[in-house]
Every structure is written in structure tokens, then in C-alpha cells.
Image: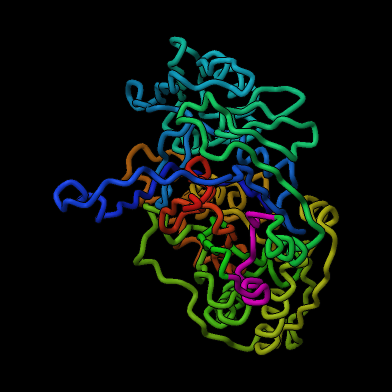
């Protein structure tokens, strides 16, 4: 769950009007025939650098959709679902599916098929919150009923789960479908309910490094870099033939503290460590200014966030344990986090903390997290757009509570978010969660991250401010050669 590159898509379209053409009939100028593009290649080549998602995951992110996705403020909105309405007494929802949606094998998307997918996949996805579900049933071909034992906001938030049919290839409902076993080629799905894409074909190519992929883009062999860390933008240079689009990610750079090991059992130590970090300096030096200081796992743009809640102000004080320097070893499994780790090490050294860094491979990193075999661990943790994910990480029963952290106040606040029956209940619980994190932090929360995608100017890309451009992939089109 450290790297989950699921694209939180929305539908947007930017329309540009050219005013002089509106005067053609009143000005007396002659009307010219429409300009026709000459030999436009409608294949989009996507390059993946090392550290990106794999080819299969990139394909799945494009080919598969959920019933809901989320807007910039983490409000759920329809996606494969057309709409929903509450059932009686607020104990669930009736979800209406899009009537013209089909899977990539031509099978219509029906309530009975979606019911079976949710029954099979949702328990493992939601984990403990699934206990709130009483029944999932199909009341008609297009109506899906989800009945609850008690109010549960996390069930609706969990309906982002991919709706995918089992098969040898990825069988989803998205605007592009996979056509090869290696999943390197995708074709426009002509029966897509939102209308066929303007691009006819995607080709996804992995490269051994981001620099290699960038070089291929400069040679015009690649049209899109799937993901570029903002810290690498300056080193890659600039090109007049390439547009770079940055976007906020629902990930927070976090130093997870094992509260059952050594000095991290003391919450005063954990609080002092949070106050020892100059987050603004870290963002300037490591992220080149592309980031937002983090005071916990609630996204700064979440609709229910309490803006009055104070953060961890920079107030460094010397830290010792029994008169001796506090010593710890920090593991990290992603090479791109090394600069972040070195800056955290340097800042903590100023308050007397001796932090030894240990780089391990990704598989070992996950194994040690699962086993609790670490003192502290640096990771880029998904913590949005909704609050189901913070529940996974910081509730005492959460499946990814690697530090074995336990706090009655945090558990009560997260349970309040989970079972809030109104917006006001939800807001109060989120405020309580924020305050509980400040009082008893389970980790050092560093910064919310940004990423960038680079796209050749051969393609027109509709942009919605603050959103990932992949949300408009269906509307991308080759630039008209006039």
C-alpha cells in the first residue's frame, strides 16, 4: 500500500473558442473550407521509468473503473455508477449503474455482475469496515442495493474498488482495453459509454531509468512520461516540444515509528521528533518547493478537515534518552527517497538524534514492515483522497498499522468518522482525529507530495486545475497539423 498508483480520474473538458470566425458572415470576408489534419498519428506512446508502476498496473489504471471516484475535496462522485440515493433510515444506498456501460468483452455491466464482484472483492479491500455491510443485492438489471447494519461512511468510500471481470487479460470498462498478453498495447474501446476516445491506440514501454525514458521522449519515440518526480524536473532539462503538468497526490512522506521498540514507546519523544523537523526547509531543499507541509494523515484539501487545528510548529529541542543521544535505524525501500532520508537525518542530528539509514530492496522492506522488524521506516504512504486509508494505517486494528501503534483517542475518532451519519458528525470526528494525532503522533509526518507527467505537444491535453491529467485521457487528441 506504499505505492498505489491508482489514478483518481474525473471527467473534464476544456473548450477553446476562436472569436474571429464568428464574424465571417457579417464582415463580408469569404468563407474558407475547413482545415483538415495531414497524416496525424493517433498512437500515444507512454514511457515508464524505473520506480514507476509496472506495465500491468499502468494498464489496469487505464482500463478499469470503480463505481465512484472523488473530486478535489474528497467528495465521492459517480463514475461507473450513474447516481445513488440513500435507503430508508440511512442504512445503505441504491446505486444506479450506467445503462450503456459494457465490459471490454462486450458483456453489459449489470447489477448482478457487479454484486458478485463486490461480494468477492470488497471484504478483502475494506477489511474490518466490511463488518458494517448486511447485504449486497441486485434489485433490477441496473439497480444495486447495499444495506448496512449501521451507518458507515467507509462503505461508500470503498466503492472506488476496481470493477473488473476475471479473465486472462484485464477486462474492465474504461476508455481503453488491453489487447496483448504482455499488456503493452491498448486500443480505444469504441463502445465506451462516455464516447470513443480520440486516440486510437496506446503503447506502454518500460525503461531502465527515468533519464532513458526522457531521452527517448526528446527523440520523439515517447509521447508521455507516466510519472516524473518533481525533484527530477530541473535535472531533466526543458524542451519547447514538451508540456509538463504537475498535480497533487494523495500521498504523504512519512517516517513510521515503531511504538513498541525502544524510545518510540514514549509519546513525548514522538512529539518532540515532529517538532524537530523544519518542513518548509525540507520542501525547499528536497522537493524544490513542490509540496505541502504535513501535520498528519488528513489531506489539506479534504472537505471535512478542520482548518483551525494547529500543526507541528518548528520548535527543535535537544533529545536524549537517559542522558545519552537517541539512536535509531531508519529503513527505506525506494531509492528515490534517499534525498528525503538524508535531509531528515541531518535535521534530527541538530537535536542530538543519531539516525542510521539503511536502504533495502522493496520486497525486504515490505517483509520487515509486516513483521514489525524495524525501528523507523521512511515511506511515501497513500493517505487519501478519502479517510478510509488513514483508518487502515493508524487504527489499532488497521491492516497496515506496521508500528503496532495503539491510541484510544485515535481509535475513537476514526470509529466516529467511519460511523458518522451526517456531514456534521463526520466533521466533528475528523477534527477529533486531527487533534488526537497532534497529541500522540504515531509517525513523523513530513510533506504531501506532488508529481508531474510530461506530454509531447503533438497532443492536446484538456486540463482541470489541480487534477491529474490522466483523468481526461479519453479527450486527448493529436494536435491538428494546419
Q: Position of residue 471 (x, y in %)?
A: 50, 46
Viewed as shown, does residue 307 lie left or right of 396? left
Residue 150 lies, with reference to residue 380, above or below; the image says above
Q: Is residue 320 visible?
A: no
Q: Position of residue 228 (x, y in %)?
A: 64, 63
Please state which of residues 268 and 475 is positioned toward the viewer in this rendering: 475
Q: Position of residue 315 (x, y in %)?
A: 52, 85
Viewed as shown, does residue 465 lie left or right of 125? left
Residue 237 lies, with reference to residue 476, above or below; the image says below
Residue drawn 37% across and 50% down?
Answer: 14
Residue 182, located in which quarter of the rendered image?
top right
Instruction: State the colouring used for the structure image.
Output: rainbow
Residue 290 lies, with reference to residue 167, above or below; the image says below
Residue furthest left as drawn: 26
* 316 in the magenta segment: no
Q: Position of residue 90 (x, y in %)?
A: 35, 27
Q: What stretch of residues is rendered in magenta?
A: 222-239
Viewed as shown, does residue 46 lie left or right of 190? right
Amino acid at each position: 500500500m506504499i505505492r498505489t498508483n491508482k489514478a483518481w480520474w474525473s471527467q473534464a473538458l476544456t473548450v477553446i473558442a476562436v472569436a474571429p470566425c464568428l464574424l465571417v458572415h457579417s464582415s463580408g470576408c469569404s468563407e474558407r473550407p475547413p482545415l483538415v489534419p495531414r497524416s496525424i498519428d493517433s498512437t500515444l506512446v507512454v514511457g515508464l521509468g524505473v520506480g514507476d508502476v509496472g506495465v500491468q498496473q499502468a494498464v489496469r489504471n487505464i482500463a478499469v473503473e470503480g463505481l465512484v471516484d472523488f473530486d478535489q475535496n474528497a467528495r465521492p462522485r459517480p463514475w461507473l455508477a450513474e447516481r445513488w440515493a440513500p435507503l430508508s433510515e440511512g442504512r445503505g444506498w441504491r446505486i444506479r449503474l450506467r445503462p450503456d456501460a459494457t465490459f471490454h468483452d462486450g458483456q453489459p455491466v449489470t447489477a448482478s455482475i457487479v454484486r458478485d464482484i463486490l461480494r468477492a472483492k470488497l471484504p478483502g479491500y475494506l477489511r474490518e469496515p466490511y463488518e458494517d455491510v448486511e447485504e449486497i443485492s441486485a434489485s433490477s438489471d441496473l439497480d444495486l442495493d447495499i444495506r448496512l447494519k449501521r451507518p458507515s461512511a467507509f462503505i461508500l468510500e470503498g466503492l472506488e474498488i476496481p470493477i473488473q471481470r476475471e479473465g486472462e487479460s484485464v477486462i474492465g470498462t474504461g476508455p481503453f482495453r488491453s489487447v496483448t498478453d504482455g499488456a503493452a498495447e491498448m486500443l480505444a474501446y469504441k463502445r465506451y459509454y462516455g464516447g470513443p476516445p480520440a486516440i486510437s491506440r496506446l503503447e506502454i514501454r518500460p525503461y531502465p531509468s527515468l533519464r532513458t525514458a526522457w531521452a527517448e521522449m526528446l527523440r520523439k519515440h515517447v509521447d508521455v512520461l507516466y510519472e516524473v518526480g518533481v525533484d527530477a524536473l530541473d535535472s531533466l532539462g526543458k524542451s519547447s516540444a514538451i508540456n509538463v503538468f504537475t498535480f497533487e497526490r494523495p500521498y504523504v512522506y512519512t517516517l513510521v515509528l515503531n511504538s513498541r521498540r525502544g524510545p518510540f514507546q514514549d509519546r513525548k519523544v514522538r512529539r518532540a521528533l515532529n517538532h524537530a523537523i523544519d518542513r518548509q526547509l525540507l520542501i525547499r531543499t528536497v522537493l524544490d518547493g513542490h509540496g505541502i507541509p504535513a501535520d498528519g494523515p488528513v489531506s489539506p484539501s479534504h472537505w471535512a478537515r478542520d482548518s483551525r487545528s494547529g500543526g507541528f510548529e518548528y520548535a527543535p529541542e535537544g533529545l536524549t534518552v537517559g542522558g545519552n543521544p537517541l539512536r535509531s535505524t531508519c529503513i527505506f525501500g525506494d531509492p528515490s527517497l534517499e534525498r528525503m532520508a538524508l535531509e531528515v537525518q541531518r535535521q534530527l542530528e541538530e537535536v542530538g538524534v543519531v539516525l542510521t539509514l539503511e536502504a533495502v530492496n522493496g520486497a525486504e522492506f515490505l517483509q520487515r514492515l509486516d513483521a514489525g522488524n524495524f525501528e523507523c521506516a521512511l515511506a511515501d504512504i497513500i493517505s487519501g483522497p478519502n479517510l478510509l486509508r488513514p483508518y487502515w494505517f493508524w487504527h489499532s486494528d488497521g491492516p497496515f498499522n506496521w508500528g503496532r501503534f495503539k491510541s484510544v483517542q485515535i481509535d475513537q475518532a476514526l470509529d466516529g468518522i467511519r460511523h458518522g451519519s451526517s456531514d456534521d458528525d463526520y466533521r466533528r470526528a475528523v477534527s477529533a482525529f486531527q487533534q488526537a494525532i497532534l497529541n500522540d503522533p504515531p509517525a513523523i509526518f513530513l510533506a504531501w507530495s506532488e508529481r508531474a507527467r510530461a506530454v509531447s505537444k503533438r497532443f492536446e491535453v484538456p486540463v482541470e486545475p489541480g487534477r491529474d491529467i490522466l483523468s481526461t485521457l479519453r479527450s486527448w487528441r493529436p494536435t491538428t497539423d494546419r
